[in-house]
Amino acid sequence: MDEDWQVLLSFFPQNWIELATSTNALKGLRKDKDTEDYIRTLLMHVGCGYSLRETATRAKLANLADISDVALVKRLRKAKDWLHNMCVALFEEQGIRLRKSSDLQARLFDATIVKEPGKTGSMWRLHYSVQVPSLMCDFFKLTATKGEGTGESFFQYPIKKGDFIMADRGYSTASGVHHVISKKAFVILRVNTAILPMLDLNGMEFPLLEKVQGIKEAGMVNSWNILIPGKKGKNAEGRICAIRKSNEAIKIAHEKLERNAQKKCHKVKPDTFEYAKYVIVFTNYPEESFSAEEILEWYRVRWQVELVFKRFKSIAQLGHLPKHSDDSSKAWLYGKLFVALLTNKLVEYAESISPWGYILEEYPDAECLA
């Protein structure tokens, strides 16, 4: 147990202890001030999915901390900025960069299911908005998983004028697009070809499949100005940007479609196979400032972030969601994300860098790579 903990620590950001101090995570703690014991106790809760009470009991038995579940909530709340900054540090290690601008507020919208442990554990849908590339959570909301007004939708979020939003195909509805545009905001949205209606500039049905099939080679990009019809004949202006996948990526996409079809006992439509050859997004980002290539590059970076959040989503199902305050809930979210980022880093090192799966602490990174 101690050996595994030391290995895990080697994957923490190098300045993780300094971050605890600079964010005041340790301020006011009268007992058990050991930083390792502090973060280890928190990770038992957010990473292992133990309830607050069970975490406090286990921490006491392991001689990590002698605290109550109420005190643990306070510690979690106090660690919010610390956990967030460690997430940012791990995220930056991946080399993902977006252009920074004081005028550009990029936000990633997504949702996941949270199931609390036990046979009677409640189910929640967690809607959250994360700023990119800072990873600052600026909004979250819990809803039921069934019933009207509980699904993934732009209507779940506060949207401000000038927001630049990125979202997956679960948000691909005409009403959602019109809602974003009505707020004078901008969106990059993966197109759900079965749901999102499109018109050409003359008001006729836009021949999307015919257009994208004109992209014959991998890496080729094209775009078309279109209209998204809305209520009372009102149309929203935007662009379709599309790129053809590589042959290997197309093969993987087709195999996934076939597997899903077998599970559900139905046949894949020919058009679905064709659309799987492309990445197709809708956007109303200003055309004079964002070329089609840049739109797709933004979506590519958003997808890299999404890979991290895919792991976050699976981990998020393993615990009691704190509902005591916004700060404790955000700290819980950052803790989940921190575990997901650590997991990504562990997998990458285990598969591609070190045959034993972790870093030798005696040698600096430059010497190891040399």
Image: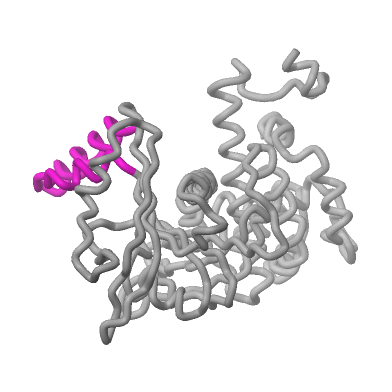
Residue furthest out toward the top: 370
Which of 345 and 117 lies nearest the eye of the viewer? 345
Q: Is residue 234 above or below residue 352?
A: below
Main SS of the magenta part reads helix
Q: How many marks?
A: 0
Q: Residue at x 31, y 81 (%)?
A: 234
Classify the position of the N terminus by image quarter: top right
Q: Is residue 364 left or right of residue 216?
A: right
Is 45 magenta? The answer is no
The reply, left or right, for residue 19 in relation to residue 241 is right
Image: magenta residue range? 249-278
Q: Residue at coordinates 62% horizontally, 42% vertically from top-left?
A: 96
- The x and y percentages for residue 209 are 21, 49
Does the rendering let one see residue 213? yes
Quadrant location of the C terminus in the rendered image: top right
Residue 344, horizontal then vertical, whole percent: 56, 37
Residue 354, by quadrant, is top right
Seen as rendered, the residue at the extreme bottom is: 232
- The image quadrant that residue 150 belongs to is bottom left
Camera-side residue: 228 or 134? 228
Residue nearest the observer in this picture, 77 or 101: 101
- The answer to whether 324 appears left or right of 368 in the picture is left
Q: Going 86% across and 61% down the picture, which residue do you hit? A: 24
Residue at image point 84% right, 55% down: 32
- Residue 275 colored in magenta in the image: yes
Q: Pinpoint residue 72: horizontal percent, then vertical percent.
A: 71, 64
Q: Is residue 315 visible?
A: no
